[in-house]
Amino acid sequence: VQLQASGGGLVQAGGSLRLSCAASGRTFSSRAMGWFRQAPGKEREFVAGISWNGDSTNYADSVKGRFTISRDNAKNTVYLQMNSLKREDTAVYYCAADSTLTRYTAARSPAAYDYWGQGTQVTVSS
């Protein structure tokens, strides 16, 4: 599975962005997907995850109610809609595909993911 993230940019606090992650490979629709982020000097952290079929989602507490993860298996794409952005959301955002097929609840640990996109920068200004 190869992943290509896009949609990052510079936005004012309170604004919105939509990230996309386009996947190649036949097993995308059988894998849970996750979004992670990494700010300078910090460890990579879980942001949101979605099950292989889209029925189950989970979020970090810091983004719950503001971010929404979704997927379109027909288009081999996963999305992250980010609303009410805050300065502390500034980071490089990565999409990742689970190493295990058909996991129902997306894992929060980066170690569960074998496939990673290149990252897209999100910068939120005050």
Image (cartoon, helix red, strand yellow):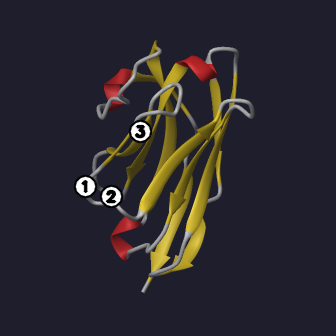
Q: Which residue is mark 3?
A: 49
Residues 11 and 41: in front is: 11
Q: CA distance from mark 2 to mark 3?
A: 12 Å
Q: Quadrant of residue 28?
A: top right
* Identity of the residue drawn at 69% across and 31% down: 76
Task: Label 3, secondary structure: give it.
Answer: strand
**What amino acid is found at the position of numbered circle 1 in the picture?**
Asp
Percent position of residue 81, x then y: 54, 58
In the rendered view, tell whether residue 59 sits above or below residue 7: above
Task: Label 1, secondary structure: give it.
Answer: loop
Q: Residues within 10 Å of mark 3 (few under 14, many from 20)?
A: many
Q: Which residue is mark 2?
A: 64
**What amino acid is found at the position of numbered circle 3 in the picture?**
Gly
* Identity of the residue drawn at 41% across and 34% down: 56
Q: Which residue is mark 1?
A: 61
Q: Which is more N-terminal, label 1 or label 3?
A: 3
Furthest-bottom residue in this view: 126
Quarter of the picture containing the C terminus is: bottom left
* Identity of the residue drawn at 69% across and 15% down: 26
Residues 5 and 49: in front is: 49
**What amino acid is found at the position of numbered circle 2 in the picture?**
Lys
Q: Residues within 10 Å of mark 2 (few under 14, many from 20)?
A: few
* Identity of the residue drawn at 44% across and 74% down: 84
